[in-house]
Image (cartoon, grey):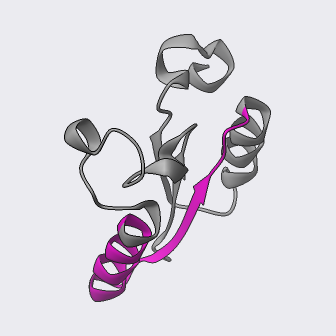
Amino acid sequence: MNNNIIIINGPNLNLLGEREKSQYGSLNFEDLKKICKENCLKLGINLDFEQSNIEGEIVSLIQNSRNKYNGLIINAAGFTHTSVAIRD
């Protein structure tokens, strides 16, 4: 079995480390991506790491992931509370 996963990040996560450091910390988005990829490499997992501020792009990423990945992790960020399409 292939170990292919995708991590999809929602709006404003590209600004990690730049805004509200007291709440979100100083780790930036590229650092987070690097840490995830390094850990997946150690575990033999192929990782794609995506981010979008656009709800429709996230829905497309989810739909296109069905036959390409063995698993999907999503941090929908602000869309967690507002997106029926992503939740569906």
Q: Is residue 77 above or below residue 17?
A: above
Number of numbered discs overlaid on the protein picture: 0
Q: Quadrant of residue 57?
A: top right
Above-or-below relation of 55 to 4: above
Start-end of magenta stretch: 32-54
Task: Identify which residue, 85 or 13, lies in the foreground.
Answer: 13
Q: Is residue 1 left or right of residue 79?
A: left
The image quadrant where one finds the C terminus is: top right
In this rendering, position of residue 53 left or right of residue 32: right
Percent position (x, y) of residue 40?
35, 77
Residue located at (72% from left, 35% from top): 59
Residue 20, given in percent of the width and then of the height, sits at 33, 38
Residue at the image point whose x is 58% and y is 37% from the top: 11
> Residue 27: x percent and y percent?
30, 61
Figure check: 74 above or below 72: above
| Residue visible at 50% across and 24% down in the picture | 78
47 lies left or right of 88: left
Residue 39 is a magenta residue: yes
Q: Is residue 7 left or right of residue 36?
A: right
Q: Is 20 inside the magenta-drawn segment?
A: no
Which one is in front, 46 or 15?
15
Q: Quadrant of residue 68?
A: bottom right
Q: Position of residue 28 (x, y in %)?
A: 39, 61
Q: Nearer the viewer, residue 21 or 39?
A: 21
